[in-house]
Amino acid sequence: MKRLSSFLAFTFVVTLSGATFSNAQQTEVRKRTPKLTTDDVVTTRTSKTTETPVAAVEEPAKKAGEAVKSDAAKSADPKSDGTTQGATDKTSAAEQTWRDQVAKTRERAESLERAAEEAELRTTELRNELGSSKDVKQRNSTAAELENAGQQLTLAKNQARTANAELKKLLEQGSSQGFTESQGPKAATADGKPNAAYYKTRYEKLMQTMRDAERRVQLYDNRVRSLNESLVNTNRDRFSSGQLEQDRNEAQDKADEARTALSKVQADLESLINEARANGVPPGLFR
């Protein structure tokens, strides 16, 4: 009986151990078998959907780089007038303002000088008419006009003197800051063709210079003639005669300078026209 109890107890222990070992194996198998959850499926699909090919990223960047290079190339293309598109103008705002002021002041000073010279020529003409006229009424009218022309002459000389002083001051200020006046259009465009604007501008300046020289030749010849008459026809002391001679000599020098300037500008005009003709500039430009 005692042995039967021991055998049954041993059998129970063995059976229990086997069951435990089997459960342990099943548990281990369950742990080793991966489970596929809903989160795993969503994550996998999302990662596959949002993944971007390398080529798709590189292509826009490549195109952007090409666009930048293209813009840079366009900004470096020369324009027809020889400048560069997009290039920074080397002339500062202050220098450009100075250039504009100089141009306006110079034009005003030259215009006033011409007005003064023309007024002097007119006074000389009226004075000659007054001396040769015998009609009293005509003489009175001429005398009144002569007085008016004399006033205009004085006013124009004073204004020209003031404008020239302003111009001189501007030029000194610009020189102290390293400013330079605009050189105007070039003789040829960027593509090597003759620049009509250059020839037109140059021609107009030379024509004005020629008119100024012609007027000054007449002006100083009148002064020389008038001073010679004063020396011959008037009894003066030695000091007054010496001053008249000095004035006459200065007027003669000015007349000679005006004739030299006239000859030079005439030669410059001829040279300009010949140059323009050789370069194919239409002759109608010089009208």
Image (tube, rainbow, N blue to C red):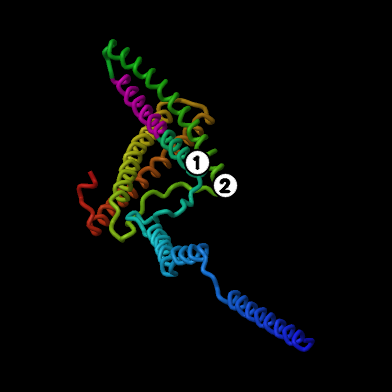
Residue 172: percent from left, percent from top:
55, 42
Q: In terms of depth relative to the viewer, which is nearer, 229 or 161?
A: 161
Q: Is residue 97 left or right of residue 5?
A: left
Image marks 2 and 1: residues in contact by CB distance under 8 Å? yes
Going by the numbered disc 1, the residue's amino acid type is: Trp
The residue positioned 40% from the left and 60% from the top of the image is 67
Q: Give the residue type at disc 2.
A: Gln
- Image quadrant where residue 103 sits: top left
Q: CA distance from mark 2 to mark 1?
A: 10 Å
For label 1, the residue is 98
Name, please, the residue furthest toward the right: 2
Q: Quadrant of the N terminus?
A: bottom right
The residue wearing badge 2 is: 177
Q: Residues within 10 Å of mark 1 (few under 14, many from 20)?
A: some
Q: Give the side of residue 124 with respect to residue 21, left or right.
A: left
- The residue depicted at 41 percent of the width and 69 percent of the height is 55
Tell me, yes or no, whether the highlighted magenta stretch contains residue 128: yes
